[in-house]
Amino acid sequence: MTEKAAARAMEPEFEGALWHKSTYSGSNNGCIEHAALPSGRHAVRDTKDRTLGAHTFASSPWQAFVTAVRDGSL
């Protein structure tokens, strides 16, 4: 793990986050995890290498993404 990845993985924003593995994850390790953060933001990370950190999103763009995935417009 690089120093930058280690620092990113330990950011205070992620403290207490409850990560959930996608229900669409298959057996080929192509998995992601999502967490609703205490700040109201949302985070997504790669299950295979959590040390890479996570992408974070404000609530509104995250909800727009989830809606687009569910209704098939993506």
Image: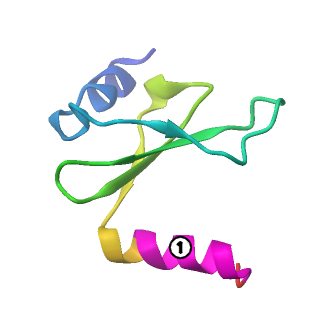
Q: Is residue 74 left or right of residue 66?
A: right
Image point 22% across, 59% down: which residue?
40
**Residue 10 counted in the magenta span:** no
Q: Is residue 42 left or right of residue 23?
A: left
Q: Quadrant of the C terminus?
A: bottom right
Q: Where is residue 7, by image quadrant?
A: top left
Specify the principal SS of the magenta part: helix
Magenta part of the chain: 62-72
Image height of 17 relative to 23, above or below: above
Image height of 8 relative to 42, above or below: above
Report the residue marked by disc 1. Answer: 65
Image point 65% across, 72% down: which residue?
69
**Residue 68 counted in the magenta span:** yes
The image shows residue 58 at horizontal and vertical percentages of 30, 67
Q: Quadrant of the N terminus?
A: top left
Q: Secondary structure at mark 1?
A: helix
The image shows residue 27 at horizontal and vertical percentages of 82, 30
Q: Where is residue 13, by image quadrant?
A: top left
Q: Is residue 69 left or right of residue 17?
A: right
Image point 27% across, 58% down: which residue?
41
- Residue positioned most to the top: 1
Image height of 34 relative to 7, above or below: below
Q: Nearer the viewer, residue 34 or 11?
A: 34
The image shows residue 71 at horizontal and vertical percentages of 68, 82
Using a 10 Å C-alpha cutoff, classify the residue at mark 1 as few (fewer than 14 neighbours), some (14 to 19) or many (20 or more): few
The image shows residue 70 at horizontal and vertical percentages of 65, 74
The residue under label 1 is which amino acid type? Phe
